[in-house]
Amino acid sequence: NGGGYGQGMNNMNANMATAQARMQQLIASQQKMIDQFRKNEESLRKQLSERDTHWRQSLKNSLNKKDERIQELFQETLALENKHKAEAKKVVELRQALMKARASSSQMLFSVRKLPGVPGAKSNSNSNL
């Protein structure tokens, strides 16, 4: 019966070796999964960083464009205000010229003297007015 004991130990050692091999396969499989998860995590972090960088650059570009447009509108507003002032000055000058012309015309009407009558005419009134 001594041979049976040795064979039982051999079977037990074989079973342990099989269990240990399975355990090592399981550990290796889990290690591969962990490594893949780490790679995926790193890839996602990189994508997130790139997306964040792209978003920040897009926002910066958009704000710069808006700042440029605000500056353009500000310059256009200043130009229009200056043009408006120049036009208002012209209006004042034209009104003054018109008032002078009216005053001059009125003076001419009131300072007109009666011209001598036409010889042979019945009345001395000025028919040319």
Image (spheres, rainbow, N blue to C red):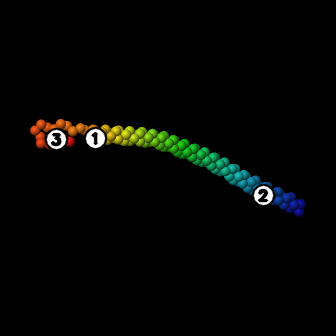
Q: Quadrant of residue 117?
A: top left
Which dot marks residue 69? none
Residue at the location (30% across, 39% down)? 107
In the rendered structure, which disc, 2 or 1, sits on the residue that comes first in sequence? 2
Which dot marks residue 124? 3
Whole-angstrom CA distance, mark 3 to mark 2, is 149 Å
| Residue that lies at the very extreme toward the right in this rendered image | 2
**Residue 32: horizontal and vertical position, in percent?**
70, 51
**Residue 73: horizontal and vertical position, in percent?**
48, 43
Q: Quadrant of residue 14?
A: bottom right
Position of 9 relative to 92 (above/below)? below
Between 100 and 114, the one nearer to me in the picture: 114
Label 2: which secondary element: helix
Camera sees residue 76: no
For the residue marked with disc 1, what is the amino acid? Phe
Between 56 and 39, the one nearer to me in the picture: 56
Task: Write down the residue under mark 1.
Answer: 110
**Residue 40: horizontal and vertical position, in percent?**
65, 50
Residue at the location (12% across, 42% down)? 122
Q: Quadrant of the C terminus?
A: top left
Whole-angstrom CA distance, mark 3 to mark 1, is 19 Å
Label 1: which secondary element: helix
Which dot marks residue 19? 2
Position of 6 relative to 128 (above/below)? below
Q: Nearer the observer, disc 3 or disc 1?
A: 3
For the residue marked with disc 2, what is the amino acid? Ala
For the residue marked with disc 3, what is the amino acid? Asn
Label 3: which secondary element: loop
